[in-house]
Amino acid sequence: MRILICTDGSKYAEEAIRFGGFIAKGAKAHLTLLGVIEGPDEAEKVRKSLERARDVLAQDVSALETKTKMGHAAEEILSETEEREYDLVVVGSRGRRGITRFLLGSTAARIVQHTPISVLIVKGKRPSLRNILICTGGEERGEEDVRFGGMIARSIRAQVTILHVMSQLALAPEARLEDLEATGEELLERETPEGVHLRKGLQILRELGVAGEVKIRRGLVVNEILAEAEEGDYDLLVIGAHAAPGLYRFLLDDLTTQIVLGSPRPVLVVKPKGYEH
Amino acid sequence: MLRTINLLKVGLVIMAIFLFILALQVLKEGAGGLRPLLERFDVAGVINSLGFGWLGAYLVLSGSPVAATALTLFAAGVTSDVETFAMIAGSRMGAGFVVLLVGFIYYLRGRGGVTSVFVGVLGFLVTATVYLPALVVGYLMLISGWLDGFHLNLPSQASDLMALTYDPLVERMTSYLPDWGSFLLGVGFLLVSFNIFDRALPELDVEHSRFREIAHIIYRPVVMFLFGAAVTMIVPSVSISLGLLVPFSARGYVRRENIIPYIMGANVATFSDTLLASLLVSAPRAFAIVFLQAASVGAISLIVILFYGPYQHVMEQALEWLTNDQRRLGFFVAVILIVPLLLMLM
């Protein structure tokens, strides 16, 4: 696995280095540390950040290199991912909210939207990385998200909860209601489309040797994912970003960005192979 | 997606339109017959009229026939512009409750769990939160005289043709009937015309379509708003418009995220037949009244769509609060059932 961890010398980037470094160590990954200097007065801060990171990670990560680029953070990170092949990009997030986010945008969200590579956005300080929540839409394409999240979990010996949010409502009272009211176990037993997918998810985790369980919540997808992340005190959320072809890109809602921006916890956005924005 | 249009359906549409126009003319003729009833229950003013329209929608399980009837009452001089405006708003509130009532009856009969009422509760909440502010905005604009100069009528040739076709027929039908009898006959024609129109709706064959494959995906609110408006433009009620979504999902489900903007779009487009009725009743301000209502509902809906996240969150919490306690849900349904009666008799 090739991992790119990016730093601009901020305290958010320091957390990204710590969190990403932990995964790189577990996965025995080839790690590149990229320092991005946005202005001349930031060069020293970035240089020191890279030095600190190298000192800390050198003991645990055998394949480690550092690079420095000058320019706009999002642009430079995106160009680096185009120039070289990576499996995962790790960035810190300031977690801007409200009007600041509206005016300045989010570097993390921009990277997520434009790179075909999976992105880990590190937010807040997590003391450990033991509990992972993999959110899946109950479809075949979600299996890739479970696999990628499972591989991360295996490398750091974390446990996994697969979450599926049932946001469906019955259009007519005579519609099949049992599935909407079923528990996770019942869905698995009944082999509903969601049940089949969740069973497959558990099987993928088993094959990877990762302990996993299934959880069902009902409500709005984004709200329920964020609520579960908070209530379950998870250290990492894993979600999928699936490219929508042509016109559908303009028609479909961007739940991934909403979760990335709304979550106070680290979020790993898994991109399927061949993802194109 | 749409099967080829067959001649029978075209015939049904023509028949429905013919009956719709006939119903409006007969209703206009007999509208005076409703005056004693309105006087007996002292139905006057905005509040009473709101309740009257609302209750009327309960009786016929639809809003559009009541809205069309309200316009004929206005054309016959039985109700004022603001009363007509409130009556039409009431008819939409009543129609919004019909879906909830049907779901609740299913629930009481043990046919399904509490999830059977979710769409009904959401539909009513969305309708109420959009229509009640729109009622206030529209009412203030109406009494301010802002739209006094805004008239739209059918071209004189069309009016003449309509008079030539319908006047002898209406005269023959109503000459032996008391006014209230003509009114009831008109309501009957109206209901039959909407019923025929339902039967003429195109059958959707989405079993293997690409749309069905992705129907479970969450759409941008504005997309669902426009979709709801487009579908409802061709059907006479929001509940039928919701029913048209069923074939798009294998199990008859819809995403929570999609349904609110869809209902909002449907609530705006449901005025299409009432706008048509406002032209057909030949009363100068009728079109302005309906247009103002559609515009107010559209404007409030667009504001909500702009701040969709917080609104959706509040709706979701209200839905959860109302449905997680059986007694609370029952109380809510009972209150909504009684409210129009209280408004009418106030």
Image (cartoon, rainbow, N blue to C red):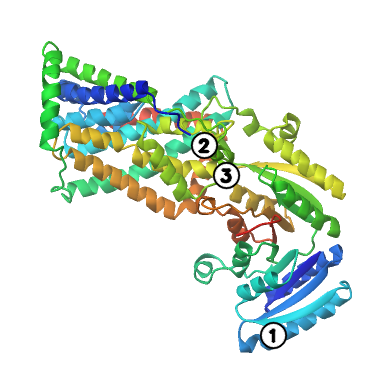
Which mark lies nearer to you, 3 or 2? 3
Q: CA distance from mark 1 to mark 3?
A: 44 Å
Q: Which of marks 2 and 3 precedes in the sequence?
A: 3
Q: Chain of mark 2?
A: B
- Give residue B333's quadrant in the image: top left
State the image coordinates of residue B323 (x, y, percent, origin top left).
54, 35
Q: Are marks 1 and 3 in contact (CB under 8 Å)?
A: no
Q: CA distance from mark 3 to mark 2?
A: 26 Å
Q: Chain of mark 3?
A: B
At horizontal 14% and vertical 35% (from top left) the residue drawn is B283
- Give residue B270's quadrant in the image: top left
At horizontal 41% and vertical 43% (from top left) the residue drawn is B264
Q: Chain of mark 1?
A: A
Residue pointed to by mark 2: B322
Q: Are marks 3 and 2 in contact (CB under 8 Å)?
A: no
Q: For the residues tagged 3 and 2, is the chain the same? A: yes
Mark 3: amino acid: Ile
Above or below, comparing residue A42 to residue B290 in the picture? below
Which mark lies nearer to you, 1 or 2? 1
Task: Classify mark 3: residues with Cα within 10 Å, few (<14), some (14-19) or many (20+).
Answer: some
Quarter of the image with the C terminus of chain B in it? top left
- Give residue A50's quadrant in the image: bottom right
Task: Please state the total of marks drawn on the protein image.
Answer: 3
Residue pointed to by mark 1: A45
Task: Classify mark 1: residues with Cα within 10 Å, few (<14), some (14-19) or many (20+).
Answer: some
Q: Which label belongs to residue B217? A: 3
Q: CA distance from mark 1 to mark 2?
A: 55 Å
Mark 2: amino acid: Leu
State the image coordinates of residue B143 (x, y, percent, origin top left).
18, 47
- A199 on left or right of B138: right
- B218 on left or right of B46: right
